[in-house]
Image (cartoon, rainbow, N blue to C red):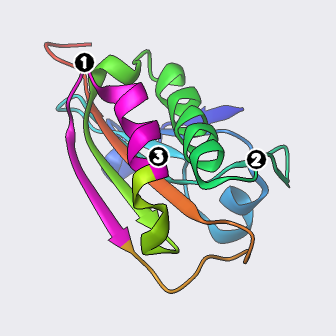
């Protein structure tokens, strides 16, 4: 796990890597922290250590959010700092299970949230991908 300062034109942007193989292969950061305190976490699935770690839509949603929380942790933030979530679902039939996972994790936080049905993911056994945005109030 590492982080880099970014390019000279964006030196105040903090980029966070979790070491996932696709980060290097496709040239992205797991999370990016902006100078205004906003932390954007890239799409997270239930892939842990290169393996899909959970089967049911509910389990995949929980694990996907845990992957996002690990990135937020590197920025010194937690789930209580989340202000927006996006959940991309493979099947509309999974709305209730994935929504239940979201409620369990965020009921006290109540971020703005979206659920979007998509046509597929990079691996056909994945049924959900999540993104989170968190905010660091005040200054670092």
Secondary structure of the residue carrying tag 3 is loop
Secondary structure of the residue carrying tag 2 is loop
Q: From the viewer's perspective, is the residue at label 1 or at label 3 nearer?
A: 1
Pick the quarter of the image with the N terminus: top right
Locate residue 137, reporting x and y percent.
Answer: 16, 17
Q: Measured along the vertical axis of the image, is residue 12 above or below residue 93? A: above
Dots 3, 2 in contact, CB < 8 A: no
At horizontal 23% and vertical 49% (from top left) the residue drawn is 113
In terms of sequence position, does the residue under pointer 1 or pointer 3 come before the other? 3
In three-dimensional space, the C-alpha distance between marks 3 and 2, rounded to whole angstroms, equals 33 Å
- Using the rendered view, name the quadrant where residue 86 is placed: bottom left
Residue denoted by label 1: 108
In three-dimensional space, the C-alpha distance between marks 1 and 3, rounded to whole angstroms, equals 34 Å
- Using the rendered view, name the quadrant where residue 109 is placed: top left
Is residue 113 shown in magenta? yes
Dots 2, 1 in contact, CB < 8 A: no
In depth, the one of 43 and 17 nearer the eye is: 43
In depth, the one of 118 and 5 nearer the eye is: 118
Name the disc covering residue 54, or none.
2
In terms of sequence position, does the residue under pointer 2 or pointer 1 come before the other? 2
Is residue 131 shown in magenta? no
Secondary structure of the residue carrying tag 1 is loop
For the record, the magenta segment spans 97-116
Q: Residues within 10 Å of mark 3 (few under 14, many from 20)?
A: some
Q: Measured along the vertical axis of the image, is residue 124 above or below residue 109? A: below
In three-dimensional space, the C-alpha distance between marks 2 and 1, rounded to whole angstroms, equals 25 Å
Q: Is residue 136 left or right of residue 131?
A: left
Residue denoted by label 3: 6
């Amino acid at each position: 796990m590492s982080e880099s300062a970014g390019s000279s034109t964006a030196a105040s942007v903090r980029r966070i890597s979790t070491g996932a193989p696709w980060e290097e292969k496709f040239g992205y950061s797991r999370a990016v922290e902006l100078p205004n305190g906003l932390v954007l976490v890239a799409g997270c699935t239930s892939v842990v250590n290169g393996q899909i770690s959970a089967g049911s839509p509910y389990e995949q949603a929980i694990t996907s959010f845990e992957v996002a929380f690990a990135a937020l942790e590197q920025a010194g933030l937690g789930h209580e700092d989340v202000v927006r979530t996006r959940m991309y679902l493979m099947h509309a039939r999974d709305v209730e299970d994935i929504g239940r996972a979201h409620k369990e994790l965020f009921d006290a936080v109540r971020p703005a949230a979206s659920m979007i049905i998509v046509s597929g993911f990079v691996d056909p056994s994945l049924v959900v991908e999540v993104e989170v945005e968190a905010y660091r109030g005040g200054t670092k």
